[in-house]
């Protein structure tokens, strides 16, 4: 799987999510099974599955919504504010 930053025809940023094709997954499985090293001239095919766009806001902007992230550590869950700049 690959996440890659891309630009559209209007030069706007978005993120593309790509997965290896069936053929590439089969080829990589064979290589792994045979414990082959990746050759520099090997090529693998990926297919763009989904595109993601976003609107970034920070605290100085109207309609700003606070965002938090959660993390599981041992027997607890901790959170922190996700700040954007």
Image: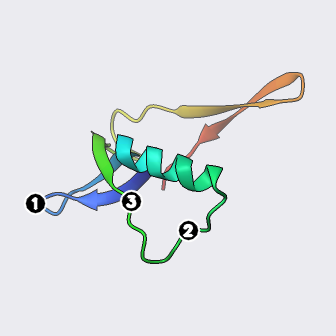
On residue 44, the disc is 3
Relative depth, front residue between 66 and 26: 26
Label 2 environment density (alpha carbons within 10 Å; few <14, some 14–19, many ≥20): few
Q: Position of residue 67 (x, y in %)?
A: 53, 33
Q: Position of residue 7 (x, y in %)?
A: 23, 60
Identify the residue under disc 2: 38
Q: Residue at x 51, y 52 (%)?
A: 28
Residue 48, above or below 42? above
Residue 46 visible to an observer of this rendering: yes
Q: Secondary structure at mark 2?
A: loop
Q: Quadrant of residue 62?
A: top left
Residue 52 visible to an observer of this rendering: no
Residue 33, above or below 7? above
Closest to the camera, between mark 1 and mark 3, is 3
Q: Secondary structure at mark 1?
A: loop
Q: Earlier in the sequence, mark 2 or mark 3?
A: 2
Label 3 environment density (alpha carbons within 10 Å; few <14, some 14–19, many ≥20): few
On residue 9, the disc is 1
- Label 2 with label 3: CB-CB less than 8 Å: no
Q: How is the image coloured?
A: rainbow
Relative depth, front residue between 10 and 42: 42
Q: Residue at x 34, y 32 (%)?
A: 63
On residue 73, the disc is none
The Cα atoms of the two marked residues, 1 and 2, are separated by 34 Å
């Amino acid at each position: 799987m690959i996440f890659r930053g891309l630009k559209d025809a209007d030069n706007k940023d978005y993120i593309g999510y790509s997965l290896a094709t069936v053929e590439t997954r089969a080829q990589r499985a064979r290589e792994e099974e045979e414990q082959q090293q990746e050759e520099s001239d090997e090529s693998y095919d990926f297919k763009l599955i989904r595109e993601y766009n976003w609107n970034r806001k920070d605290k100085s902007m109207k309609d700003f919504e606070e965002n938090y992230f959660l993390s599981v550590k041992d027997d607890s869950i901790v959170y922190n504010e996700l700040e954007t700049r």
